[in-house]
Image (cartoon, grey):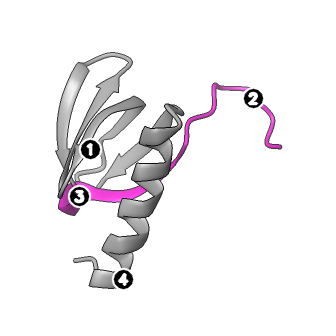
Amino acid sequence: MQGKEDDNILKRKIKYYFENQLPVHISLRSTRFLNGKVLKFAGDLLIIDDQFLGATPVYLEEIKYVEPFKERGEEEK
């Protein structure tokens, strides 16, 4: 379970990606992952437009980590 500080960092990251409409890779605690843009972010819930599943609701407590989405073969900057 994440601590309050971890939750705050996670929220700030998601808010940044949401406000800048940047694609993200979200790894869930269930070992699943989602790739796409955050459509909505409010409180502990976000809606991600996953590239395969479409609009998918995710609660912060389900998230293991979030990072920028990179296409396969895309070099790190």
Q: Position of residue 23 (x, y in %)?
A: 51, 31
Q: Position of residue 34 (x, y in %)?
A: 35, 35
Disc number for residue 60: 3
Q: Amino acid at mark 4?
A: Glu
Nearest the camera: 10 or 19? 19
Magenta span has 66? yes
Q: Quadrant of residue 75?
A: top right
The mark nearer the N terminus, 3 or 1, is: 1
Q: What residue sits 30% from the left and 49% below the top?
A: 31
- Residue bounds of the magenta highlight: 60-77
> In this rendering, would 44 be left or right of 26?
left
Residue annotated with mark 4: 5
Point out the frontmost of discs 3 and 1: 1
Residue annotated with mark 1: 41
Point out the frontmost of discs 1 and 2: 1
Q: Amino acid at mark 3?
A: Leu
Disc number for residue 74: 2
Residue 19, can we see it? yes
Separation of residues labelled 4 and 3 (CA atoms): 13 Å
Q: Position of residue 22 (x, y in %)?
A: 54, 33
Mark 1 Cα within 10 Å, few/some/many (few <14, many 20+)? Answer: some
The mark nearer the N terminus, 4 or 3, is: 4
